[in-house]
Image (tube, rainbow, N blue to C red):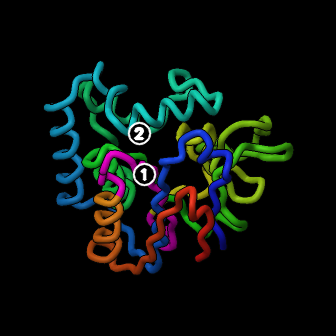
Amino acid sequence: MKYTVDEAVFEINPNLRFGIIIGEDIKNSETSPEDEARLRNAEEKMRANIKAEEIRGLRNVSLYRDIMTKAGINPNKYMASVEAMYKRIVKGGQLPLINALVDLCNAVAIEEMISLGAHDLDDIKEDLEVRFSRNGDVFLPFGETEYEDVDPGEMVFTSGNVVQTRKWLWRQSELGKTDLESNHLIFQLVGFGDNGDQSLYRALKSIEELVRNRFGGRFKTFVVDKDNRTIEF
């Protein structure tokens, strides 16, 4: 299977970096007290250090918003999921517990302030791509059973013509949802390669450690950029 980022995406911001981890033989579980403690500690640290009005100014959040705007996506109406998560936290809310894998991914996304999504590869049948949508692309909303059409020209993460995430970082599909049976996953992290920022690489290392030590699995790690737009796994 291949994962490709279209050249047009890098034309918006040539410093984009997509960190990809393919995890295999993962043994997911219910969230343990230790797992929850890591998540709650990350939430508390963010709550203690960041005010709601400062979230848009966070380096990665600001860059996500800029790319979405340039791609024709209103980041206020279709807020990147990670930005919405941060707002919920700093306003005093806690994230609901889902399962160990999802909750620990959320913890890493909070710790490193980076967009991080996990998709179950058992639900994904065709090559993956970050591109602008075309005629015939469809999306299965979370919790739904009927597909909806996606208008051409929308920046999406897709498998063939089946969109996995709409409006780039806004909303994931029901397909690829991570549950207790998920054992073969792709983790997609979105960072940047300029100004010496290392959040992407720290987050990749954290996910690698979780796959190996917490979930007893194996992994392969890739970084996709404008000079290396396609990987195969």
Q: Secondary structure at mark 1?
A: strand
Q: Residue 130: x and y, percent? A: 64, 52
Q: Residue 74: x and y, percent? A: 58, 24
First along the sequence among labels 1 and 2: 2
State the residue at coordinates (66%, 64%). 124
| Residue to which mark 2 is pinned | 82
Compared with 14, 81 (above or below) is: above
State the residue at coordinates (44%, 72%). 221
Q: Residue 35: x and y, percent? A: 23, 58
The picture quadrant where one finds residue 168 is: top right
The amino acid marked with disc number 1 is Leu
User: Between 199 and 79, which is closer to the camera in this rendering?
Assistant: 199
User: Between 40 and 33, which is closer to the camera in this rendering?
Assistant: 40
Q: Which residues are magenta?
A: 180-200
Task: Rate crowding at label 1 as few (under 14), some (14 to 19) or many (20 or more) other CA atoms within 10 Å.
Answer: many
| Residue to which mark 1 is pinned | 116
State the residue at coordinates (30%, 54%). 198
Is 186 part of what is drawn in magenta? yes
